[in-house]
């Protein structure tokens, strides 16, 4: 029983982490039709920012740091979109390549700046003590992380469904040409969404830090997870990314616990199934 | 710089009739600098160790005014990026373009294996750091020595210590799912079970594991957990292990890289009390290390560990061998014989080699303590002159298959 409850909570916390990682990716993919391969690097940048800030001043709260790192990464993402991506807008493959190149640049810069060691992001003081529930122990921070993901999901949902900006983004996702025709500034929208996506990744990087730590290669470990979640959940669907994150969290956690030999492929099996049976993803809005 | 006739002749000889004639030509002696090639991963995920390897070796040479046995030394560092194919290209470059006389490194077993045959074919004396067992067991090379440890060499003493002195009965092992982890855990298991202990669970995690939570939750109840990890993965696992409150339930012990100084400098009080085993510690109390460790710390603001220690050690063994050959590196056979006959007093203590080229030297059981405000691995017990075969008979040992995920079989795994 304890096994199921602990691993269930583990799945939820991993799912929460994955949503913070993948929602930005999904947002950008949905509107811009761009597989942003810099996404893992943005996430890692957030983790490094968080680790550095909290090492320099241990009194900072992780929430403040997450928001600041999010803003910083959003700014970097915005510059990248404006200065590089827009110049390649007629060349979608070139755009994907340049995001890959950018991820290499960021990871090498991180290595030069922070060296090769793993740097921890400290768990917030008041969340360090494990939670004791019905006689077993679980790290409190992981539970809080699920809360973070749900809060982020609700905020994003409200932003997309209840604001004018959200309406414009949705219009852009459904039909960019038509949106342009009715006077929606799609180019600006691209920048805003790219900043937003990068910012969520940066903030997610800080929040995931206490579990992951900042280390060279974090970007490459994270990017495939974002891809899997988005492919599973469906491109351009926030709810899809949300459900996809938790499905992947459950499959990964129980998969590695029950069938450790399959640890390498456990994440790709559901992806292959979905691609074979429902190529647009569970809740995809786009045709394949 | 005008090229003297001698230099010209020696270069021509080196380039033209390299492997046949060059070793026997003695006129080349003292005709130019000794060229040492260092293969180190300075970029990519192994960069932390690779950078330390370069810093320590550079420091070693600087202390000697870039002169060994009366000859100038030129160090050529090649970045392998932690990729076997790159290691191969760089090794070729070092040998064919830079005409190096010997190689130090590389760090990772898969890099070392990728270049082993090539270095043997080119007959280049190599002072190895990587731990892959068979490089000095079933597939030794006359041109290769290892100065650090095989994957399991340092694990044996800790296994005995756990069973005999700590009285542990049941241990869980965890390591990265590649040869280094397999071999180390296998050696630990063998020695621990031969001393009456039981390994009740062996966990191997993929190199890219996003979340260790699901593995931590699987750990069965035991006296201790043995970490056969290296670099960031072990560090991440350990942090999660502590977050789950597991460190209150069982002791943590580790192999030679699990709580290396490079990991310790990013940890806090949670690491206190953990026992690990290694051929080195920045805290070692010997004459050579009393010079090295404080100087390294002064210059780079952190303690040297496994990787920095390994190349400094290589430098010391090489220096001793060069003293024997009176600075002659052109006679590669003589140089190799001198290296293999080493009796050098180094930062890890006295270093000798067995006939397969693997080091025989002290192994230290260390405990994480706080000293001057920083975490250190203080030595609590020394196992003198440990060989790669531990207490086992060499012939029988070599008849067995090499250690792996499933060999020797674990008899006491709990369902």
Image: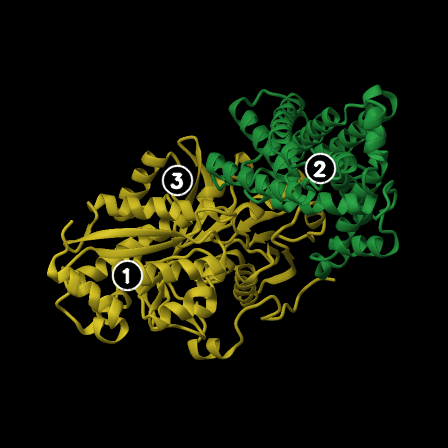
The colour chain B appears in is yellow
> How far apart in space, not on screen, are marks 3 and 2 (Cα)?
35 Å
In this rendering, position of residue B393 left or right of residue A66: left
Residue at (16%, 61%) from the top-left corner?
Answer: B8
Q: Residue B276: x and y, percent? A: 49, 50
- Please state which of the two labelled residues, at mark 1 or mark 2, is closer to the viewer: 1
In this rendering, position of residue B218 left or right of residue B112: right
Q: Which residue is mark 2?
A: A21
Looking at this view, is B288 or A82 the one in front? A82
Say if residue B227 shows up in the picture: yes
Residue at (51%, 59%) from the top-left corner?
Answer: B159
In this rendering, position of residue B55 left or right of residue A212: left
The colour chain A appears in is green
Q: Which residue is mark 3?
A: B303
- Please state which of the two labelled residues, at mark 3 or mark 1, is closer to the viewer: 1
Q: Which residue is mark 1?
A: B99
């Amino acid at each position: 029983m304890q096994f199921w409850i602990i691993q269930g909570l583990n799945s939820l916390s991993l799912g929460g982490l994955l949503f913070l990682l993948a929602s930005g990716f999904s947002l950008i993919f949905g509107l811009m039709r761009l597989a942003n391969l810099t996404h893992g690097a943005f996430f890692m940048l957030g983790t490094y920012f968080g680790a550095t800030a909290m090492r320099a001043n241990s009194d900072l709260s992780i929430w403040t740091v997450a928001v600041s790192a999010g803003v910083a990464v959003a700014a970097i993402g915005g510059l990248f979109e404006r200065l590089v991506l827009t110049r390649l807008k007629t060349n979608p493959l070139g755009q994907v390549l340049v995001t890959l190149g950018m991820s290499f640049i960021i990871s090498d810069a991180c290595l030069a700046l922070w060296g090769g060691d793993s740097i921890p992001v400290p768990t917030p003081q008041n969340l360090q003590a494990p939670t004791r529930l019905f006689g077993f122990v679980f790290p409190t921070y992981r539970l809080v992380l699920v809360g973070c993901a749900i809060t982020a999901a609700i905020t994003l949902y409200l932003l997309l469904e209840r604001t004018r900006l959200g309406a414009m983004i949705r219009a852009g996702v459904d039909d960019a040409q038509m949106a342009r025709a009715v006077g929606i500034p799609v180019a600006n929208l691209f920048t805003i969404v790219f900043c937003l996506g990068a910012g969520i990744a940066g903030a997610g990087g800080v929040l995931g830090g206490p579990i992951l730590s900042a280390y060279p290669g974090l970007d490459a470990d994270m990017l495939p997870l974002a891809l899997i979640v988005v492919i599973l959940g469906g491109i351009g669907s926030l709810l899809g990314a949300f459900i996809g994150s938790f499905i992947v969290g459950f499959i990964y956690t129980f998969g590695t616990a029950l069938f450790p030999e399959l640890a390498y492929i456990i994440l790709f099996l559901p992806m292959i199934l979905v691609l074979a049976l429902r190529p647009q993803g569970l809740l995809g809005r786009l045709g394949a | 710089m005008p090229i003297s006739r001698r230099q010209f002749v020696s270069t021509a000889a080196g380039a033209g009739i390299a492997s046949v004639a060059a070793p026997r030509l003695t006129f080349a002696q003292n005709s130019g600098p000794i060229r040492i090639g260092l293969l180190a991963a300075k970029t990519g995920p192994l960069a932390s160790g690779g950078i330390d390897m370069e810093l320590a070796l550079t420091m070693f040479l600087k202390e000697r005014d870039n002169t060994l046995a009366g000859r100038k030394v030129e160090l050529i560092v090649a970045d392998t990026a932690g990729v076997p194919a790159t290691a191969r290209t760089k090794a070729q470059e070092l040998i064919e373009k830079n005409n190096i006389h010997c190689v130090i490194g590389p760090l990772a077993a898969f890099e070392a294996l990728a270049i082993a045959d090539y270095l043997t074919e080119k007959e280049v004396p190599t002072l190895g750091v990587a731990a892959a067992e068979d490089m000095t067991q079933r597939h030794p090379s006359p041109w290769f020595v290892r100065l650090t440890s095989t994957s399991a060499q340092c694990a044996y003493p800790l296994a005995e210590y756990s069973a005999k002195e700590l009285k542990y009965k049941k241990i869980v092992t965890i390591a990265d799912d590649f040869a280094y982890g397999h071999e180390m855990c296998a050696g630990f298991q063998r020695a621990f079970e031969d001393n009456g202990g039981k390994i009740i669970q062996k966990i191997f995690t993929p190199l890219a594991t996003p979340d260790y939570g699901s593995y931590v939750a699987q750990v069965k109840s035991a006296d201790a957990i043995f970490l056969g990890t290296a670099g960031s993965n072990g560090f991440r696992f350990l942090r999660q292990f502590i977050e789950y409150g597991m460190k209150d339930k069982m002791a943590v012990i580790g192999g030679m890289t699990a709580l290396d100084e490079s990991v310790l400098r990013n940890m806090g009080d949670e690491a206190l009390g953990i026992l690990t085993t290694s051929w080195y510690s920045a805290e070692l109390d010997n004459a050579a290390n009393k010079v090295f460790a404080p100087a390294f710390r002064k210059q780079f603001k952190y303690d040297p560990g496994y990787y920095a220690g390994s190349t400094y050690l290589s430098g010391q063994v090489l220096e001793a061998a060069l003293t024997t050959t009176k600075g002659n590196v052109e006679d590669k056979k003589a140089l190799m014989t001198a290296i293999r006959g080493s009796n050098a007093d180094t930062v890890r203590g006295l270093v000798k080699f067995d006939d397969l080229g693997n080091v025989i030297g002290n192994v230290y059981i260390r405990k994480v303590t706080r000293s001057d405000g920083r975490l250190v691995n203080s030595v609590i017990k020394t196992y003198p002159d440990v060989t790669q075969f531990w207490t086992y008979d060499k012939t029988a040992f070599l008849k067995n298959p090499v250690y792996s995920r499933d060999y020797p079989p674990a008899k006491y795994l709990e369902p």
